[in-house]
Image (cartoon, rainbow, N blue to C red):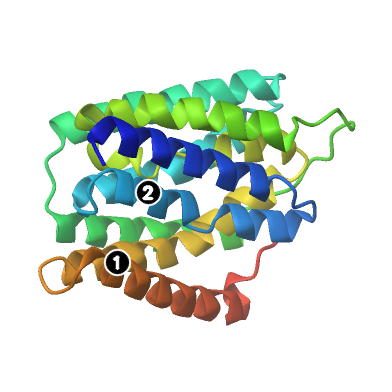
């Protein structure tokens, strides 16, 4: 399969995944489903399967994207679509800047992310984070979400040489999750931040196995580690989502 065909196939795969995810309605289940690294896994396959520090930078940015939308909507930006677009553009812009001008080793990036995660968990436990119910509006159909995500994925995968690992963690599902989840952005942001440590564990596993196993085994082992860490995170009462 040539590079163009792989890019197109990967973009369509992510689009289908997002369309299926869009059928979830319960806010806690939706927040958990949207934090699953399914689009990340497909994007990782599409970009060659090698994990480095740029993937960790992207993980910081996807958290920042969700918290950015939570903070600005509706306090500073009354339109959720505008807040969503600005958040996505900031992700791409900051991702390109960080990857280009902030050289980091993989393990330094892992250490930095872990410290940021601990700080975020402390702040989440001390600050009042609330969901703000909005008036019911017509949601975007799963088919439209799948179509738009496919196009967006194709464009980003085509620019993977510039964004590197940040393409893998781009909030493909998040750009729709924040629109439909605008009444529970606090729950969405907290859930992803908490669960992101499990995604970090997946990246570390793939990185460690890179030269010792075929990629399918690296990724499947990474998923096993992800699910184990996720189970631990969800079982700890101190990490319970509070909104």
> Does residue 80 appear anywhere in the picture?
yes
In the rendered image, the residue lying farthest to the front is: 1
Is residue 239 rendered to the left or right of residue 196?
right
Circle 1 is placed at which residue position? 216
Residue 217 lies, with reference to residue 69, above or below; the image says below
Which residue is painted at 33% across and 34% down in the image?
5
Is residue 236 rendered to the left or right of residue 108?
right
Q: Are marks 1 and 2 in contact (CB under 8 Å)?
A: no
Is residue 233 rendered to the left or right of residue 52?
right
> Does residue 121 appear anywhere in the picture?
no
Which residue is painted at 41% across and 59% down in the image?
117
Q: Quadrant of the N terminus?
A: top left
Dot 1 alpha-carbon crowd within 10 angstroms: few under 14, some 14 to 19, many 20 or more = few
What element does badge 2 sit on? Answer: helix
Circle 2 is placed at which residue position? 59
Whole-percent x, y for residue 42 in the image = 40, 50
Which of discs 1 and 2 lies nearer the camera? The answer is 1
Is residue 168 rendered to the left or right of residue 172?
left
Dot 2 alpha-carbon crowd within 10 angstroms: few under 14, some 14 to 19, many 20 or more = many
Residue 56 lies, with reference to residue 216, above or below; the image says above
Whole-percent x, y for residue 10 in the image = 40, 41
Whole-percent x, y for residue 47 in the image = 26, 43
Whole-percent x, y for residue 3 in the image = 24, 35
Q: For residue 168, which quarter of the picture?
A: top left
Q: For residue 76, which quarter of the picture?
A: top right
Which residue is painted at 28% across and 26% down in the image?
159
Residue 142 lies, with reference to residue 205, above or below; the image says above
Which residue is painted at 65% across and 21% down in the image?
81
Q: Earlier in the sequence, mark 1 or mark 2?
A: 2
The residue nearer to you, when weighing 153 against 67, is 153
């Amino acid at each position: 399969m040539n590079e163009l065909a792989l890019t197109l196939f990967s973009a369509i795969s992510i689009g289908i995944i997002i369309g299926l995810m869009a059928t979830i309605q319960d806010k806690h289940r939706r927040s958990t489903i949207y934090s699953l690294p399914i689009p990340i896994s497909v994007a990782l396959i599409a970009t060659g399967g090698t994990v480095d520090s740029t993937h960790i930078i992207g993980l910081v940015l996807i958290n920042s994207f969700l918290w950015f939308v939570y903070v600005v909507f509706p306090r500073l930006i009354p339109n959720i679509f505008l807040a969503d677009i600005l958040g996505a553009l900031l992700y791409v812009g900051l991702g390109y800047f960080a990857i280009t001008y902030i050289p980091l080793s993989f393990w330094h990036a892992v250490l930095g992310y872990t410290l940021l995660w601990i700080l975020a968990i402390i702040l989440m436990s001390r600050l009042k984070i609330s969901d703000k119910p909005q008036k019911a509006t017509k949601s975007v159909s799963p088919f439209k979400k799948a179509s738009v995500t496919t196009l967006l994925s194709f464009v980003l995968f085509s620019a993977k040489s510039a964004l590197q690992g940040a393409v893998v963690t781009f909030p493909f599902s998040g750009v729709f999750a924040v629109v439909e989840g605008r009444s529970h952005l606090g729950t969405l942001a907290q859930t992803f931040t908490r669960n992101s440590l499990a995604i970090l564990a997946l990246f570390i596993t793939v990185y460690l196995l890179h030269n010792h196993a075929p990629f399918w085994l690296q990724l499947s082992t990474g998923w096993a580690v992800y699910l184990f860490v996720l189970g631990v995170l969800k079982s700890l009462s101190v990490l319970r989502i509070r909104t």
